[in-house]
Image (spheres, rainbow, N blue to C red):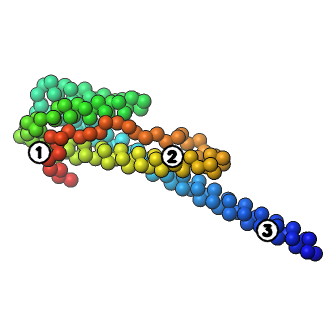
Amino acid sequence: MPVLWHRVSTLIWIVVVLALIGVYLSWTAGRLDRLHSRMDAARAALDAQLLRRASVAQELATAKVLDPAASIVLYQAAHAARSAEEEQREVAESDLSQALRVVFADTRQVAAVRAAPGGEEAAGELAAAVRRVPMARRFHNDSVRAARALRRHRAVRWFRLAGHAPFPLAFEMDDEPPTALADVRVAD
């Protein structure tokens, strides 16, 4: 009887340990799934902010409130950012940031926009758009960093808890806003 009891207790402990491992793996897979969902939501928010920034820049470029050269530079960069393929998106968005800094390097350009009819609102909308892009990119990259850290754990790799989800990639771009737009009041 003692031998049978010893085997039964050993079997019970093995079942308990396997159950604990299963619970841990299930919890880790759920956490990874939540991180991927958060990352997807952050990417959607980033895409929306990038689209908003390009749209506002394109509207300003066609509103005839900027000088012709600045309008062309801004329109081409905004159009390229809006129509870029996914592989070229970071470069196109960086180019738009640089174009915005070149066009709005001087506060006189911002003053010209603000002086035009509806210009105060347009300048405020552009200022809001260029301020939101770095925040949205930061949120996205933070969620990517968290998902990458969890995916590097041995248990996640050994048990393939990430499934077939692609490895998360950060969105790296130049998102430095024009300094001349820093003092524009944003009416949100």
Tell which circle, 1 or 2, labels the residue nearer the N-terminal end.
1
* Residue holding disc 1: 120
Which residue position holds label 2? 148
Residue at image mark 3 = 12
| Quadrant placement of the N terminus | bottom right
- In the image, is 139 to the left or to the right of 178? right
Residue 180 rendering spot, x and y as whole percentages: 15, 40
Q: Depth check: 134 or 2 in front?
A: 2
- Left or right: 167 in relation to 121: right
10 is higher (above) or lower (below) than 138:
below
Mark 3 residue type: Ile
Q: Give the number of the mark in front: 1 or 2.
A: 2
Q: Count residues near mark 1 (Cα–Cα under 10 Å), then give few for <14, some for 14-19, many for 20+.
A: many
Q: Is residue 122 visible?
A: no
Q: Residue at x 33, y 43 (%)?
A: 48
Look at label 2 and name its amino acid: Arg
Between 144 and 55, the one nearer to me in the picture: 144
Q: Are marks 3 and 1 in contact (CB under 8 Å)?
A: no
Picture residue at 14% right of the left edge, 47% below the top: 183
**Residue at horizontal 36%, vertical 41%?**
47
Q: At 65% from the left edge and 61% from the top edge, which residue is drawn?
A: 23
Q: CA distance from mark 1 to mark 2?
A: 42 Å
- Please, what is the three-letter code of the amino acid marked with disc 1? Glu
For residue 123, say whether it is visible: yes
User: From mark 3 to mark 1, how far is it between C-alphas?
Assistant: 73 Å
Residue 9, which numbered label? Answer: none
